[in-house]
Image: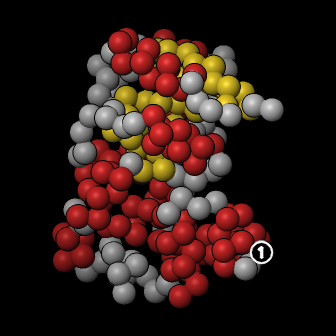
Amino acid sequence: MNTSITIWILDDHPFYTKGLAGLLEAMPKLTVNTRLFHQSKVFLEALNETQPDLVFLDINLPVMNGLEISKYLHKTYPQLKFIGLSSHNELKVIKEFMKAGAMGYLLKTIYDTELYTCINTVLSGSIYLAEEVKSVLINNTLNKSEAIGYLKPKLTPREKEVLTLIINEQTTAQIAAQLFLSEATIETHRMNLFQKLNVKNVAGLVREAYEHKLLDE
């Protein structure tokens, strides 16, 4: 039996949103109901009445840009899952968007298979980054922060294992099964990582791991 979900798309290019909606509605094993928005004001007004299961948010929007909206969403609707859409791989934008609580970041050149993988990953509670986005984060670490004395937290071998699997978009249940541990134990490791890296969400874990090369040792 198919699962039914609602996905909203906020993008000021009607042609693109219709094409994306078509791909979403063709997803296998998932019935997707889409709603399209081309103006931030209309989108935010609609959120006052009801919230979807997932939002695709264009980064480059007029009047109120995607970063501003993402920060508002994270503060006002902390349980709302949203994914960034962009035509560019800009490190600063990616980092800010992740910091604002995004569950994913995709380029508009994605194929339908990656789109489907992204949605299934995010709906399961894990973060998803396009491969090109991961490459940007890996190749553009913040050398300045390390130069001024960034104190790299000491992670235990087990915490590094858990962090690696989180970055690889594994759910708590999948990590527990792979490491032969209980889900409660994995959640404890996850909370310890949040505290050590001083972040509030999985996006923060990913950002810190890439920026400060926490898994290179």
In the depicted structure, whether residue 150 falls above or below residue 55: below
Pick the quarter of the image with the C terminus: bottom left
* 149, above or below 128, in the image: below
Q: Residue at x 55, y 16 (%)?
A: 35
Where is residue 121 shown, x and y percent of the image?
57, 48
Q: Residue 116 in the image: state x and y as whole percent.
A: 53, 38
Circle 1 Cα neighbour tier, 10 Å, few/some/many (<14 / 14–19 / ≥20): some
For residue 180, side relative to residue 127 (left or right): right
- Badge 1 marks a residue whose secondary structure is loop
Q: Is residue 145 visible?
A: yes
> Closer to the camera, 78 or 217?
217
Q: Amino acid at mark 1?
A: Ser
The residue shown at (25%, 51%) is 91
Residue 110 location, quadrant: top left
Residue 136, image quadrant: bottom left
Question: Label 1: which residue?
Answer: 182
